[in-house]
Amino acid sequence: MIRRQLGILISAATLLGSSPPLLAQDGAAALASRFEALWNKVTGQRLPANISMSNGRIEAQQILISAKLAGRLAEVMVNEGDVIDAGTPIARLDTADLDAQLAGARAQVRRSETSQVEAAASIAQRESELTLARQELQRAQSMSDTGSGTKQQFELRRSQLNVAEAAERAALASRDEAEAATEAARAEVVRIQSLLDDAVLKAPRRGRVEYKLAQTGEVVAAGAPVATLLDLSDVSMTIFLPASAAGRLAIGDEARIILDPAPQYVVPATVSFVASEAQFTPKTVETQDEREKLVFRVKLRIAPDLLKGYESRIKTGVRGIGYVRTDPAAGWPSELQVKLPQ
């Protein structure tokens, strides 16, 4: 078989070398390209020694949009495949109970504020009574010293002063209690308002809705996912490499990705993760050296700035091949130069 293929190569080489003048230049170039491809297939020529490859698939960070509260979904506002910005409402829970609680909490705030006003008025009254009691005690003291007043009158005025002082302390305590009740009522309003805000599920960042897991009218439990969102700014491919290649990689090294549905394009990427422990080769992964059973997981991440221009083309699960360069000083071969769709 090899002899037959080599014979075809020799014939092709002879034809290429003895092309008549009428042979077009582009036809000769195409024939030379086919000759080179056939030679690589027969001789088993591989990538340069400083390039390692492994197959993988495109993955995007998945975000679960879950309900913080249990309740009935009043509305689900998105559909699968929608691209939404950060802060976009995704679903809304029925909040009739929370609305009633909020109204009660606000009424309690008003009641507490009224108690504060009453406490302030009571303090003013008690302070006036205390001032009068002190003046009466001083007058009784003067009269007792000159002999125009009795000791009984003096003791009565002293007792009245003690009562006025106690009444003032009680009024101050009532004011403090009213202030604390007002703060507690306001905190309850904030808490219920926070629950109302949580009843509207919003996208934490820009992404594409992958699955809608609940429909309008369904009752969901606390923590139950309502939808899943794909983060279009965090897209990567996970590949598995033997220790001989993974051990020479560094975080931030350049990489290349070629997808099976679009082999004509070469997507630039960077090494964002290299596993610290080896694992057995997954069945869906083929490494350059199949004899090595232990491999390291390597993550190739595509730059977010590059992804912005191709959001509509990003599809998770698409398979392809990832290439890494174990020698940063070496250049990429011509077939791995960056080439993106226009």
Image (tube, helix red, strand yellow):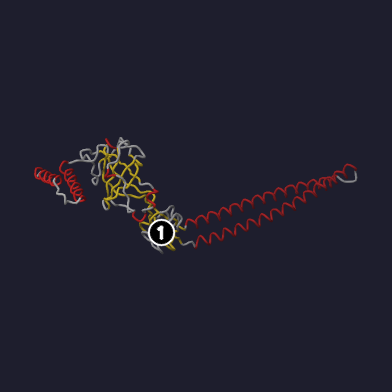
- Which residue corresponds to mark 1? 220
Determine which quarter of the picture holds residue 49: top left
Q: Amino acid at mark 1?
A: Val
* Total count of labels: 1
- Residue 145 vs residue 222, the one in the foreground: 222
- Residue 333 vs residue 81, the one in the foreground: 333
Rendered view: 181 above or below 254: below
Q: Residue at x 53, y 54 (%)?
A: 191
- Residue 246 vs residue 170, the one in the foreground: 246
Q: Is 116 displayed left or right of 340 in the figure?
A: right
Q: Residue at x 35, y 43 (%)?
A: 270
Rendered view: 64 above or below 45: below
Q: Please identify the quadrant where the N terminus is shown.
A: top left
Q: Is 158 displayed left or right of 117 in the figure?
A: right
Q: Residue at x 19, y 44 (%)?
A: 36
Q: Looking at the picture, how far across and down is residue 61, in whole percent?
A: 37, 49
Crowdedness near tag 1: few (<14), some (14–19) or many (≥20) residues, C-alpha within 10 Å: many
Q: Residue furthest front?
A: 21
Q: Looking at the picture, how far across and down is residue 321, in whole percent?
A: 27, 46
Q: Looking at the picture, how far across and down is residue 262, in whole percent?
A: 27, 52
Q: Secondary structure at mark 1?
A: strand
Q: Looking at the picture, how far across and down is residue 260, in whole percent?
A: 26, 51
